[in-house]
Image (cartoon, rainbow, N blue to C red):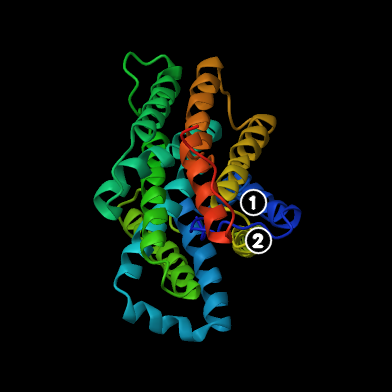
Amino acid sequence: MVDRAGAAPDRIDGPVGPALALVFNAFVWGVSWWPFRQLQVLGLHPLWATAAVYLFSLACLLALRSGALSSLRGHRGLWLLALAAGLTNVCFNWAVTVGDVVRVVLLFYLMPAWSVLLAWPLLGERPTPLSLLRLLLALAGVVVVLGSDGASWPLPHSLADWLALIGGLSFALTNILLRRLRAVASQGRVLAMFAGGASLAGLLALLATAQGLAPAPSWQPGAAVYGLGLAVAFLLGNVALQYGAARLAAHTTALVMLSEVVFASASSVLLGASHAGLRTWIGGALILAAAAWSAWPARRPQGVRAQLRATARVRRGSPAPDLDA
């Protein structure tokens, strides 16, 4: 998916506009499954469609920021970011095209759980008891969702399931890499993500076509309309994300972006692309609860807050209260 991640400063500047911008981005991604399916009907496999959409986005970016190419030579970490972002896009777009949309989106949003596991070796952030509890909550939801098809053991049983899980893992890796590369200019990071989406999808499309796993692209008159509309929507969604995430606290951004699940679920159920049962909704509620919990701002203990207030009073020259009273 396009630049959907990155740390936002903890500040709020007119929150209504930025929040609406994030909702628009979530809407674009939540309903993107529909044009991808229309392109497949018209003979364009989701791998070829992803490559075309991101190639168009990459061309637009280079036309506006031609100097961004130099950043790829100066930061080797951007190549890993390109790979992680490209894999995220390939897996998500392919999964929502061929699988049950609600199930795919819920499994993809296991991403916060993957972040707990990846942040330890890559960022040195040891998991806390609360983060491990959120991980268990999310995994419990996954077990329920995967068991909703009546399988004897809740394991991924389809290509869409595996793509959704791998996509969520690579999205978590993308988020962590964006944090490690936060000193790099944003245009370099966005370029890496667009380039990764275009190149990895294109390479996999060529390999799949050569092996007979995907049909060669067949452009019909309507395909260009859907493809161009999808590319423009992704570009506008990315601009909206950059605008909103730069003006809202990071935890607020994460919570608002969960509305993507609502858009995807509602649109797919209404259009008959999903047939979610009670177990799926229960498991999805557990997964979303874990995701919302991970995005919720942490509250300092009462004693810590009191100590901080006392320190602030001392610095202003006011007498500090007796904390032992």
**Depicted 316 relative to depicted 257: above or below:** below
Residue 258 picture quarter: top right
**Depicted 320 relative to depicted 13: above or below:** above
Horizontally, residue 46 falls left or right of residue 119, namely right
Q: Residues within 10 Å of mark 1 (few under 14, many from 20)?
A: many
Q: Residues within 10 Å of mark 2 (few under 14, many from 20)?
A: many
Residue 89 picture quarter: bottom left
Callout 2: SS: helix
Across and down, in percent, residue 217 comes to 48, 59
Callout 1: SS: helix
Amino acid type at mark 2: Ala
Q: Residue at x 40, y 65 (%)?
A: 196
Which residue appears farthest toward the left when viewing the image? 121
Q: Write down the residue under mark 2.
A: 240
Horizontally, residue 174 falls left or right of residue 27, namely left
Tell me the CA gap for discs 1 and 2: 10 Å
**Depicted 81 relative to depicted 282: above or below:** below
Between circles 1 and 2, the one closer to the viewer is: 2
Horizontally, residue 264 falls left or right of residue 107, namely right
Across and down, in percent, residue 241 comes to 61, 59
Q: Residue at x 57, y 53 (%)?
A: 313
Residue 18 visible in the shown view: yes
Q: Write down the residue under mark 1.
A: 28
Q: Are marks 1 and 2 in contact (CB under 8 Å)?
A: yes
Amino acid type at mark 1: Val
